[in-house]
Amino acid sequence: MTRADKFVIALAVLLLPLLYLQFWGNSSAGEVVQIRVAGGKDLTLPLDQDKHIEVEGALGTSLIEIRDRQVRFIDSPCQGKQCLLTGWLDQDGQLAACLPNGVTVQIVGRDQRFDAVNF
């Protein structure tokens, strides 16, 4: 390994944490929640108004709660209930999905951190 190789490796090791913080660290607080339903009407609601929302998906009704500038699934007709295990969302870019029911919930703020989410 040459001196130049060591320099490049050291530079990469030093820059990676900075790049991580720049692009993925320190998310801002969310301002609105976007609720999307496959084949249905999308909703955009403010996080500063507490409410319960019933959303009709492919399997039935998903219940979503907005409280204290946070949002979460509180019930859904899917079998695995992974959407419920996601818990409260409050940071820009966070997402919870009930894929069997075709319902997604995403926090949106001023400083969006991701331009795409892949599963």
Image (tube, grey):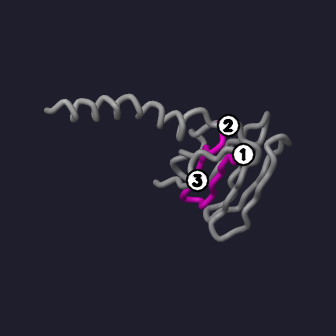
Q: In which quarter of the image is residue 50?
A: top right
Considering only order in the chain, which callout, 1 or 3, is on the residue closer to the N terminus?
A: 3
Magenta extent: 88-109
Mark 3: few, some, or many residues within 10 Å (few <14, many ≥20)?
many
Relative horizontal placement of residue 92, taking residue 2 as reference (left or right):
right
Q: Residue 28 carries which label?
A: 2
Q: What element carries label 1?
A: loop
Question: Quick check: is 101 in the magenta stretch?
Answer: yes
* Residue 107 pos. (x, y %): 68, 46
Considering only order in the chain, which callout, 2 or 1, is on the residue closer to the N terminus?
A: 2
**Do the residues bearing badges 3 and 1 touch, measured as CB atoms within 8 Å?**
no
Mark 1: few, some, or many residues within 10 Å (few <14, many ≥20)?
few
**Do the residues bearing badges 1 and 2 touch, measured as CB atoms within 8 Å?**
yes
Image vertical order of residue 43 relative to residue 95, above or below: below
Q: Quadrant of residue 72?
A: top right
Residue type at mark 2? Answer: Ser
Q: What residue is disc 3 on?
A: 98
